[in-house]
Image: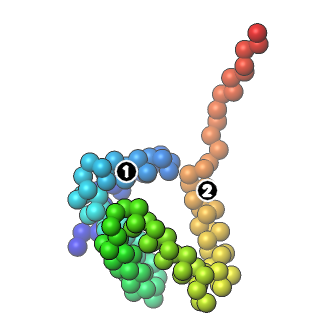
Amino acid sequence: MNTSASNDADYNGPYAFFEYWSKLAKDDPERFERERVAELEKVISGAAPEQQQGLRQLQWRIDMERRRAKNPIDAMIRVNRMMWDHLYADDGFFSTPALWKEVFKMVDRMNSEFLEPKEAEVIPFKED
């Protein structure tokens, strides 16, 4: 299996990332699916070895819910429900404070990558 997507370019912020995937899904659904699978494989392969099997199992469940869905909105609702069920399970995310710490680290990394302050020119309003 080829695990390198053709979109390995640096994105100039989160909008470019979204625009790339959105356009690809509309223009070439088959290529979108190939690249989606390749990107997922890169993420799973980059995880700790002891986590990879669990991640593959989770992705399989997500893919099965997507296939069972009647349409994209139904797929979104199914996956969303899976997420909330897992988060609130007895051994889920909300029962494990250590996971919160990891999420906050991830958010900080994302903020530093995509939300860096930009310089802007302030244009004053014209007075009548």
Q: Name which quarter of the figure residue 41 lies in.
A: bottom left
Question: 55 left or right of 2?
Answer: right
Disc number placed over residue 22 in the picture, else none: 1
Badge 1 amino acid? Ser
Report whether residue 63 is seen. Answer: no
> Number of callouts in the render?
2
Instruction: Residue 10 in the image: state x and y as whole percent.
Output: 42, 51
Which of label 2 and label 1 is nearer to you? 1
Badge 2 amino acid? Asn
Q: Quadrant of the N terminus?
A: bottom left
Helix, strand or loop for disc 2: helix
Q: Quadrant of the C terminus?
A: top right
Measuring 34% from the left and 70% from the top, which residue is drawn there?
69
Measuring 39% from the left and 67% from the top, which residue is drawn there?
75
Instruction: Residue 87 in the image: state x and y as whole percent.
Output: 58, 79
Badge 1 local density, few (<14 within 10 Å), some, or many (20+)?
Answer: few
- Taking depth in this image into account, of 96 and 76 the one nearest to the observer is 76
Residue furthest right in the image: 127
Instruction: Residue 73 in the image: state x and y as whole percent.
Output: 41, 61
Disc number placed over residue 111 in the picture, else none: 2
Badge 2 local density, few (<14 within 10 Å), some, or many (20+)?
Answer: few
Question: 15 left or right of 70?
Answer: right
Residues at marks 2 and 1, CA–CA distance in whole angstroms? 22 Å
Q: Name which quarter of the figure residue 122 lies in.
A: top right
Report whether residue 17 is seen. Answer: yes
Q: Earlier in the sequence, mark 2 or mark 1?
A: 1
Instruction: Residue 48 in the image: state x and y as whole percent.
Output: 46, 82
Helix, strand or loop for disc 1: helix
Measuring 36% from the left and 56% from the top, which residue is drawn there?
8
